Image (cartoon, rainbow, N blue to C red):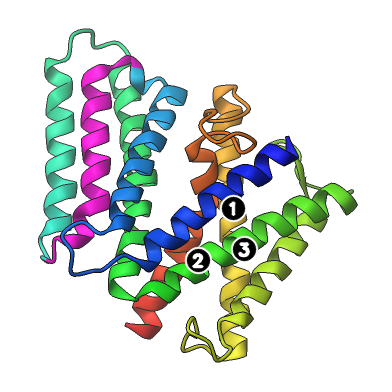
Amino acid sequence: MLSKRIITSLCAIPIVILAVWFTQPEFPFPLLTVLAAIWGLLAVYEFFRLTGVSKNKPLTIFGAIWTLLFIVQPHLDNAFTLPILISAGLIVSLTLLIFLPGKEGVFHQWAWMLGGTLYIGWLMGLLVSLRLDAGRDWLYLVFFATFASDMAAYFIGKALGKHKLAPAISPGKTWEGTIAGVCGSMIIGLLFTLNSPLQLPLNPIQAAALGIFISVFGQLGDLAESLLKRNTGVKDSGNFMPGHGGLLDRMDSIVFAGAVVYLYCIIFVL
């Protein structure tokens, strides 16, 4: 299991790094956006399959299209794009329910469709916005700090973990692993203050604080997705990534951490 986890990481991480590095914002659909769109569509289908939305083909198709639009909308530089996307999506999807055969439980499926679309489409769209608006290095901070947090939490938790963090949600997570994850993320944050091609306009206190927030919210994202899986009775969201589970399992921390860094940039940098 551990060997599969490492091999998958060694294959996936370089792809993400290259997609971020070679993305040029002036292109209509940069490499990162294409990767995010493919990942988002597969992840939202995993979400729909877990929650039963996939049994309703029209809602599944609509949710997938809506998710895709949320991911690519940062390229549409217009103040009205997002309000139109949200308003039209709500109205059209609710109108669609009227014409669907079989009305039993349809609002329950619609609610899950809406939740999955916002969870995956909206939050992955923020990653694209972060790359386009703030630049490459801020997105690298999200990925590297989250990876460091996940790895430190996993290995230290396995080796030293004794005190359960949230046994009702994820029995394997421990406070020792959580603290290790925060420390790992802080270290990565501090590295981004050094004189290097990835240096960010952060002082050590800001970098350490941002590292803490990335780890804390990344781990909260992981717990939220673990709660989803527990409520739907599965161990993994899928088996697309050997040793890691599904694509939804691998994006849970990233999208929460990305939202934190994006909000930081909006408030203090941009």
Quarter of the image with the C terminus is: bottom left
Q: Tell me which label, 1 or 3, sits earlier in the chain.
A: 3
CA gap, disc 1 and disc 3? 8 Å
Q: Percent x, y for residue 16?
A: 45, 56
Q: Which residue position holds label 1?
A: 220
Q: Which residues are magenta?
A: 55-77
Numbered label attached to residue 142: 2
> What amino acid is labelled 1 in the image?
Leu
Q: Nearer the viewer, mark 2 or mark 1?
A: 2
Image quadrant of residue 215?
bottom right
Quarter of the image with the N terminus is: top right
Q: Percent x, y for residue 141?
A: 51, 71
Above or below, 126 against 100 in this view is below
Q: Tell me which label, 2 or 1, sits earlier in the chain.
A: 2
Residue 75 covered by magenta stretch: yes
Q: Residue at x 50, y 61 (%)?
A: 257
Q: Is residue 210 left or right of residue 259?
A: right
Q: Magenta region's main secondary structure?
A: helix
Q: Percent x, y for residue 265?
A: 39, 77
Q: Is residue 259 left or right of residue 170?
A: left
> What amino acid is labelled 2 in the image?
Val
> What amino acid is labelled 3 in the image?
Ser
Q: Residue at x 51, y 88 (%)?
A: 202
Q: Which residue position holds label 3?
A: 215
